[in-house]
Image: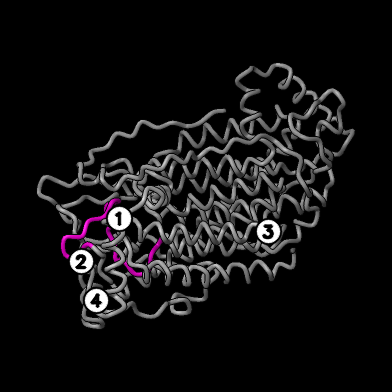
Amino acid sequence: MKKYFYLIITLLSSAFLLNACVEDLPTQYEYTGYEFADLDPNAGQWKLVIHTSNEQVAIPTPPQTGSSELNRELAEAKQKIAAATSAQRESVKYWTNNPLLRWNEIALELATKYNLIPAPNPDGTYPSPDPANPGKYPLFPYSHPPYTSRMLAYLSVAQYDGLIMAWHYKYKFKREAPYQLDPQIKTAYESNNLFSYPSDGAVIAISSREILTAMFPLEKEYLARMAEEHLESLILAGINVSSDVEAGKLIGAEVAKTALARASTDGMRNAQTNKAKSDSIKNAAKERFGWFWENQESPQRPVGLAPLFGKVRPWNIPNVEAVRVGPPPAPGSAEFNKDAEELKRFAANLTPEQRRIANFWNDGLNTYTPPGHWNRFAKEKTVAYRLSPVRTARIFAYMNMAIMDAGISCWDVKYYYHYPRPIQTIPGFKTILGTPNFPAYTSGHSTFSAAAAEVLSYFFPTDAAQFRKWAEEAALSRIYGGIHYRFDAEVGLEQGKNVGSYSVAKAKQDGID
C-alpha cells in the first residue's frame, strides 16, 4: 500500500515543539475495493450543493455499444491491461472503486505537512505565510484547524456535486462497463451493474486535484502525478474506457471551478488580520466585558490565529448570530472559580487514562487537526457499511460543511468574547499540551467534534452513541490538558450540536433517507 511521505524541513524553536501532538493516527486506512451495498440509482436526482442542475456541466453523447469507436476503446483497454506492470497493478489496488477515500487521505496528509507555525525572526516578530508567494518562508498555507476545515469542505462539496452529475448521466446513457461488454476484460474490483459513462473515478480525480492544488499550491506537481496515476488505474481496473474517463474529467474540472469561485469570495483572505485590527478586536471585548485574552508565549506572536475567520461565509447556518452562545462566567466569579479549581486538581492528579485521552485528541501542530480526526472516523464507517461513492460523498460533504460552519461559529465567539486561557488567569498554572494562540471560549475541539458527531449520527444512527461519546471525550481532553475550562468545553459541545443540526436539516430536505 503506497503512502506519500514527507521530509519536513522547518526551523522550530523548542518552545513550539512543546505544542506537538504525541498521537500516532495514520492518515491512510487499510481497505480494498468492495461490493457496494447499494448502487444508489436515483442519486442523479439528489439535491446539489453549489450547482443548480444535474446537467449544468454538459458532456457528449457516448459512443454506442457495438460501434467501431467503442470497440477501438475496448481493444486499447485490453492492450493496456495486458501490458500493465506490477507497479501499475498495485496502483489499481491502492485507488480501489471508492477513490474519494484515497483523495481524502491525501488531503489529510497535506494538512499534516503544512500544519506548522514558523519560527520567530531574530527580533522576536513572526513572519506570516503569503498566498501570493507560497514558496517563500514561511510556506503557504499554514493548515491550522480553520484552514483545514475549509479545505475539506470545498473538497467534499465539489466531489459530491460532481458525483451527482455523474450518476445522472450514468443512468441517462446506461452504457455498461468494459468488463460487462467484453468477456476478455476482467474487473479488478467486485462486479456490479453500475454504468461506466461517465467515469465517477475521473470526476473525483480531477475535482480533487483542482481543489487541493488551489489549497496547497506548492503541491501542484505531486497532485498532478497522483491524478494521472488514478486516471490510468481506471482503465487498468477494467471499469472504464477512455471516453468514460474524458467525460468524467470534464465534470470534475467544472465542479471544481464553481467551488473555487465560491472560495475566492468567502472572506477567508481577510481572516488573518494585522496587529492594529487584532488589537481593536481585543479592546472592544475589554470594553464590553472587562476581560481580554493575551497570548502567553515567549516570544509572543503579536496577532492571534485568524481573528476574522468568524466572518467567513458559512454553508448551512444562516449567520453566526443564530448560533452565538451566551457569555462565559466572569473571571473570579463562583462558577469560574469552581472550574479553575478543577483544572488545578487535574494538573496535580492526572491519571494515565486522562493523559492518554488528552494526547489522543490533541490534534496539534503537524497533525491533521480535529477536522481530520472526524474525517478518519467517517472513512471507517463508510467502508464498514460498504457505501457507494456517491453516498460516501454525501456524508463527507454534509459533515465537512458542518465542521467548517462549526469553526466559523466558534471563532466568532472566541474573538467576540476574547476570553483568557487558564494559564493567563490561574497564577503558576501549566498545561501538558502547550496553549493555542487564540482565545479560550468556546473550545474548538468541542465545537468541531459535536458538529461532526451530529451529522454522522444522522447518517449512521446505530452508531450515534459512539459518535457522541467521542465528541464528549474530545471536549474532556481539553480540560485534562489544561487548555480549557469545563464551561469552554460544555458550551462548545452545545454550540457544535446546534451548528450540526443545520446541516442535518439541509440533508433531510433532500428526501433521500
Q: Which mark is residue 426?
A: 2
Image quarter (top left, top right, bottom left or bottom right) of the C terminus = bottom right
Range drawn in magenta: 423-444
Find the distance from the CA under tag 4 to the CA under tag 1. Answer: 24 Å
Callout 3: SS: helix
Callout 1: SS: helix
Q: Which secondary structure type mostly characterizes the magenta part of the structure?
A: loop
Left or right side of 294 for 71: right
Sequence-wise first label, 3 or 1: 1
Q: Position of residue 64 (x, y in %)?
A: 86, 39
Count of picture labels: 4
Residue 143 showing in the rendered view: no
Give the residue at mark 4.
331
Sequence-wise first label, 4 or 1: 4
Sequence-wise first label, 3 or 2: 2
Amino acid type for the residue under numbered disc 3: Thr
Which corner quadrant of the image does residue 164 belong to? bottom right
Give the residue at mark 3.
462
Amino acid type for the residue under numbered disc 4: Pro
Other residues around mark 3 within 10 Å, as few (<14) / some (14–19) / many (≥20)? few
Instruction: Please state which of residues 167 and 98 is positioned toward the viewer in this rendering.
Output: 98
Q: Position of residue 256 (x, y in %)?
A: 56, 51
Give the residue at mark 1.
349
Identify the residue at the far left of this view. Answer: 123
